Image (tube, rainbow, N blue to C red):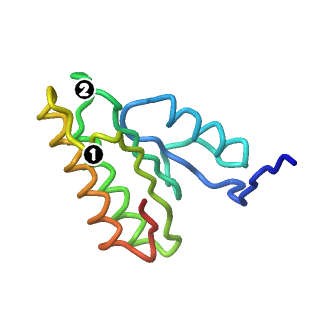
Amino acid sequence: MSRTMRIDIAGQEILVLGAPTPVSEAAVTALCANGAVATGASPRIVLVSLPLLPVPEVDIRATLAEAEARTLEMAESTAGGRVVFLLPAVAGLPMRRHPDFSAAMAGALATMRTLAMRCGPAVLVN
């Protein structure tokens, strides 16, 4: 028996921050299939997509700063919202040959947890 999960997000605006990955692209496809609209104006759903491997062209600090700003904006509004961090496994388990990337991802994980404590329950952060 095949089951399909449907969620009511018709008309919800979504925004993707950071590096496009196959995971973030699949998430956007699924959200749009359920009625969400990709935009940057006033999103109620924010996907924070960080690279799976070290990529020099991605500014992780800038992505996290924008994620924090967007989350705080949502917390101040009456509509609330959702922020979903798409983090690589290295956020919790460092890679031997990539200490700087490992530290940046650990920082991203700490940022996610801090935003969840700071902005919940108005904004759900995971």
Percent position of residue 123, x then y: 44, 69
Q: Nearer the viewer, mark 1 or mark 2?
A: 1
Where does label 1 land, which residue?
A: 91
Task: Name the residue: 49% across, 61% down.
Answer: 82
The residue at 18%/34% (across/down) is 101
**Viewer-side residue, 53 vs 38:** 53
- Asked whether, in this view, residue 60 is left or right of residue 19, the answer is left
Residue 54's tag is 2
Q: Residue at x 52, y 55 (%)?
A: 45
Instruction: Report x, y in % for residue 81.
Output: 50, 64
Nearest the eye: 62 or 39: 62
Q: Is residue 88 left or right of residue 22?
A: left
* Disc 1: CA contacts within 10 A as few (<14), some (14-19) or many (>=20): some
Looking at the rendering, which quadrant does residue 58 occupy?
Answer: top left
Q: Vertically, is 79 above or below 91?
A: below
For the image, the number of numbered tags is 2
Residue at the top extreme of this rendering: 56
In the rendered image, residue 8, in percent from the top left (x then y), is placed at: 72, 60
Alpha-carbon distance for marks 1 and 2?
Answer: 12 Å
Secondary structure of the residue carrying tag 2 is: loop
Give the label on residue 106, or none: none
The quarter of the image holding the C terminus is: bottom left
Q: Amino acid at mark 2?
A: Pro
Q: In this image, 36 relative to 119: left or right?
A: right
User: In the rendered structure, which disc, 1 or 2, sits on the residue that comes first in sequence?
Assistant: 2
Residue 26 in the image: state x and y as whole percent: 59, 35
Q: Amino acid at mark 1?
A: Ala
Q: Give the quadrant of residue 32.
A: top right
Secondary structure at badge 1 equals helix
Q: Would you call the spot at circle 2 few (<14 residues within 10 Å), some (14-19), or many (20 or more)?
A: some
